[in-house]
Amino acid sequence: MGRERVRASHNRRLAIPFAAACVAMGAQAQVQTLPEVRVIAPAERETAASPVNGYKAKNAITGTKTDTPLMETPQAVTVITRDQMVDQGATNMQDALNYAAGVRSNAYGLDTRSDGTRIRGAFPDEYQDGLRRMFDWYTSNTRVEPYTLERIEVLRGPSSMLFGQSSTGGLINSVSKLPQDRFQGEVGVQLGNYGRKQLQADITGPLTANGEWLYRLVALGRDSDTQVDYVPDDRAGIAPTLTWRPSGATSLTILGLWQKDKSGSSSQFFPWQGVLLPNPNGKIPLNHFIGEPGFDKYDSERRSIGWQFEHRFDDRYVVRQNFRYSRNDVDYFSLYGDSFTLPGGWAADPINQRVLGRFVDVSVTKAKMLQADQHLQADLATGAVKHKLVAGLDLARYTKDTSSFFDYPDYLGGTSPNIDVYTPTYTGYTLAGPLAVQPRSGVRQAGVYLQDQARYDNWIVVAGLRYDRSSTQLEGSEDSKTNATTRRLGLLYAFPSGVSPYISYSESFTPQAPASAFGTVIPLAPLRGEQIEAGLKYEPPGGRYSASLAAYKLKEKNQVVNTGTSLTQAGQTRTDGLELEFKGNVTSAFELAAHYNYTNVDAALEQLPEHQAAVWGKYRFALGGINGFSAGAGVRYMSAFQDGVAPETPSVTLLDLMLAYETGNWRYAVNINNATDREYVSTCLNRGDCWFGAKRNVIASATYRF
């Protein structure tokens, strides 16, 4: 945005000189000068909802449901700001999370259907503006558009005491752009490889002179191909937002969204032989598409409307409510490779290994979700102890209607045609039968919670308790009901020097809707988990940068395991790890974001690299006496790993680059991700298939800010 960037000190100083007073005294005049008067006004306070200059945010809301400094939150939280997303040229959620601690952002490489991420070895839940986006798989979801976001908050570790619905690994909370009280805006264009063309606009400001009504409108349109033949990445979206502030105590923000994507599946499910293991025909080209053009698609449409309401009764009591109704329609038509019948092999052509069998998987899904989260916050004191109490009620209702068709290759008794992977010939495909209407499924959940953020001197205690009642429904079957009590306890000491050691315990509970997979609907038991975490946070006086260390041990049961031909749920599993993170300004001209992850995942779960590290730096400079230039570079490393009996996925190091120039109202930039065009495998799974990572992606952009 074209917001004013104030990079001076935290206080504005206004010096007011006074003219000398002249007093006539006989024939001689005496001049008296009064001393200078300085009026010091505090700068505008950064909040968990306000824009952030640079990469380091001070506050977040996801860790406590209150506007709390990160240095006072006894749990690991990472914030990816809008400035960081812009500098790194993030075009999707995976790009935006490439430099986030605790996260494996490309768990399934380039996947146009979903943002396949992992946090601490587990599958995170997706939230937006504090409310859950879905209860189900990617076949019921639309990918988040980063351009509509002000920030992304990643809460690492269980958080069911607050949200009632989160995995052991944590959650990703996307925070929408909100109306601002000063008129500003931008219009931009992006051009890139694979025929990428995108036009985007963002405008905000007051509707009335007194600032009672504010608005924001974010819109974009994109036409693009991908590194896989016949797989587009087209999108159109609009996000209107309106804020009403009748007084300084009350505000109501209405948020709308319409987004329509037309894509396909960039994941072809290629077998081990031909990707990592030898194949007599050589390596399979990663651009090869083994579906059927004109048949395969992954088209989704998301519509949502909701609000954020806040009323402050006085300086102690405030009530808030978040509400959203959303609907997702997803049409998923796919013919994908059979790498599972002979794991990593070629059941259709075991000797020549050219012809691959294909499954047919079709689902037409309409998912609806209604949510409301309301709480009362009370800022009280008992003697020398200050309390921030939050008491809330969280409600959610989710329903899904699906029609589907599933078929096997001929050698498994089906009618799906085979294909030559190395020289694909497309003959067209027509469904061998009608879509079958699946039983309606859904989830109902209600939770009450109480949390206290207590402070005595420099000691901070965060304690909370929540009770949930959840039921999963499957039409024609008896409801599966679950009750759960989840707890949270954290202790932190904030030294005046900026060092904050902490220790915390938290639990998770996630009801899971029945999953449609392999032509059947499978009921799923709730996920349950718990974690112990100890850490150290540091922010020097002045808050120029922050650094953190977190060590954790977590365990979970009922994690979903996909074998390639079925879904199962694992028993109790354990994961432990260590995370380091740095964010902020090293000097006034050099900004840095870096992290290191060590993750030791239970052998029963899908594996990922034990070691990950990423460093991104941005340097502002002048060239030939002309200011406004900046250059960025980042390196991402993932160690080798092995999932079960699959071949070892090799380690990989990737390079990202950026060059930008800002002059007047214009910003020009070129971003190159995977600049060396490294062809790499993101993972090869125990069930038999491999996934390719994203190749070099080049985007040139021009933005006019006003």
Image (tube, rainbow, N blue to C red):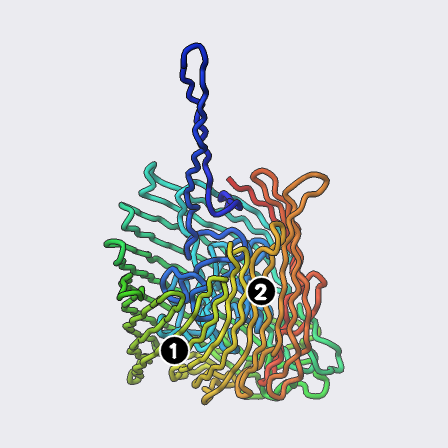
Please give the residue where the numbered disc 1 appears in the rendered image.
510
Q: Is residue 538 visible?
A: yes
* Quarter residue 513 falls in: bottom left
**Which three-letter amino acid code belongs to the residue tagged 1?**
Thr
Q: Which amino acid does label 2 sit on?
A: Tyr
Q: Residues within 10 Å of mark 1 (few under 14, many from 20)?
A: many
Near-viewer residue (403 or 21)? 21
Q: What element carries label 2?
A: loop
What residue sits right under mark 2 in the picture? Answer: 99
Q: In this view, does 328 lie to the left or right of 550?
A: left
Q: Is residue 144 above or below residue 562?
A: above
Q: Give the side of residue 573 with respect to residue 442, left or right.
A: right
Q: Nearer the viewer, residue 129 or 325?
A: 129
Instruction: For marks 2 and 1, give the CA distance.
Output: 27 Å
- Tell me where residue 241 appears, x and y as whole percent: 38, 50
Q: Where is residue 400 in the image (x, y as percent from the top left)?
A: 36, 72
Mark 2 or mark 1, whichever is nearer to me: 2
- Say which of 45 and 682 sits in front: 45
